[in-house]
Image (spheres, coloured by chain):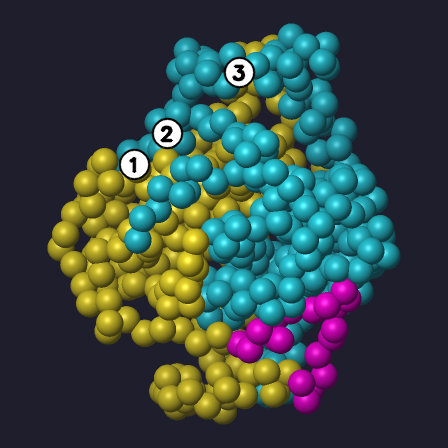
Chain colours: A cyan, B yellow
């Protein structure tokens, strides 16, 4: 099959009013569930949000990013050992998944499923956007969606038909040599890392971010504003405590 | 684009002798790198293993699963904040990513990239298999591949041309209603969970696993053998300590 499409794909943040039918969504999810899964266990669940009242409850969990209320469908992908554990219990098997490695396995599993859905939806003409704040406010999301123990929200996708596909920007990527290492990790020197990020830094959109935020470099936009120490450290503790309170304990 | 292919896809565990050229592999990886990425940060690296001596060093890290030495290419996908941090440092920006939330973000990022690669490679006629032991023996893998601090191996894919595509089994999946919840999480009763797993339990291949292992139920094959308490708890501590020693500390 030709895969040139993957060079052109882009994230869609603006959606038309067109609804996604239940049958369309189910067909996409069923295809996505054929993605690889750890030991065949399917350690995930997805919560479908269509109701506007529910979107309004989710929105503050995602710092009120407008895609949550503007998209016809919001999907919250959760690492889920609850269903598997219940199956063990009714099968005279003792579940033993209240630990960090099991959380990591389920997180891998649900992320693979979410990305397979993203790809299939895009290929079918829908547009999607990952909302990167799911693990920040996981405790609040869990409350809104009534998530039981052993279920952790990991990724959120807003899904809809693109309002104007052409107008959505195509994001830049680092040159391939930045991310590929042959046989062993080839660490970066100050010189090589500068060269790898040079093109990114010269893009108008990125120069605009630097200027708008009164910073001296694009990297400072990330460290001082977008992904800053205070948020990173605060939400680290919140998420770490949350996964333990949901049942995935570590250290013992 | 038609996506019916995704209903047919399967994991490929046996490979022909055909090599994958550098140009083919690079084209696949370049397409995969167009996958969504957290804040455009591309918090990942991939280590390409082709050398047989290196495969032999990796094999015990994966409990000597034969795909490691039989596949022409082994890809180790790593969560990577090392490159981003070095870029911050040369840009007069203070990196602030030595925490759990940053690890979680990079883990999401690399998993999305790995799955996009898996999909594109499959669509181009290659076969792939995730090796689910990467986070178990992460410290040993890091030594073999010379991974620096802030780099964590998360997923491994063996890649090659299928030896006999038709002969590879198509894995079963739970019914869609097992994994989809509308508006709120709809928890499972003993009755509903039995019904959802019933078909899986009646498959010949699963009955064979139960009989071969002298167990009373399929779930016991998972809890007592495949993903048992002793391994889960031991490798939880190993991985948790490893990510902290690589720089992702939590709690503070």
Residue at image position (70%, 62%) is A48
- Would you name the residue on which mark 3 appears? A203
Asked whether the residues under marks 2 and 1 belong to the same chain, the reply is no
> A14 and A97: which one is in front?
A14
User: In which chain is the residue bearing label 2?
Assistant: A
Q: Are marks 2 and 1 in contact (CB under 8 Å)?
A: yes
Q: Is residue B178 magenta?
A: yes
Looking at the image, residue B115 lies above or below residue B64 = above
Q: Residue at x 25, y 47 (%)?
A: B73
The answer to whether B150 is drawn above or below residue A120 in the figure is above
Q: Calculate the distance from the C-alpha at mark 3 to the C-alpha at mark 1.
A: 24 Å
**Which chain contains the residue that carries disc 3?**
A
Region in magenta = B174-192
B176 sits left or right of A53 in the view: left
Q: Which residue is mark 2?
A: A176
Separation of residues labelled 3 and 2 (CA atoms)? 18 Å
Specify the label residue B26 is tagged with.
1
Instruction: Indicate the quadrant containing the C terminus of chain A: top left, top right, bottom left or bottom right.
Output: bottom right
């Amino acid at each position: 099959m030709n895969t040139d499409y993957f060079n052109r794909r882009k994230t869609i943040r603006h959606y038309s009013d067109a609804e996604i039918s239940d049958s369309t969504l189910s067909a996409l999810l069923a295809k996505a569930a054929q993605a690889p899964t750890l030991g065949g266990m399917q350690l995930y669940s997805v919560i479908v949000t269509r109701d506007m009242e529910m979107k309004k409850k989710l929105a503050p969990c995602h710092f009120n990013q407008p895609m949550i209320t503007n998209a016809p469908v919001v999907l919250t992908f959760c690492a889920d050992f609850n269903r598997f554990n219940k199956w063990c219990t009714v099968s005279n098997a003792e579940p033993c998944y209240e630990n960090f490695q099991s959380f990591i396995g389920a997180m891998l599993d649900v992320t693979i499923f979410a990305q397979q859905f993203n790809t299939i939806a895009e290929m079918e003409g829908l547009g999607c956007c990952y909302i990167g704040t799911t693990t920040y406010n996981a405790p609040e999301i869990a409350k809104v969606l009534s998530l039981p123990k052993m279920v952790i929200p990991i990724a959120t996708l807003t899904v809809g038909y693109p309002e104007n596909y052409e107008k959505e920007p195509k994001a830049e990527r680092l040159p391939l040599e930045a991310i590929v290492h042959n046989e062993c990790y080839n660490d970066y020197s100050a010189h090589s890392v500068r060269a790898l990020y040079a093109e990114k830094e010269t893009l108008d959109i990125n120069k605009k971010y630097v200027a708008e935020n009164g910073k001296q470099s694009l990297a400072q936009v990330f460290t001082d504003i977008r992904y800053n120490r205070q948020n990173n450290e605060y939400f680290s503790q919140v998420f770490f405590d949350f996964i333990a309170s949901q049942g995935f304990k570590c250290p013992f």
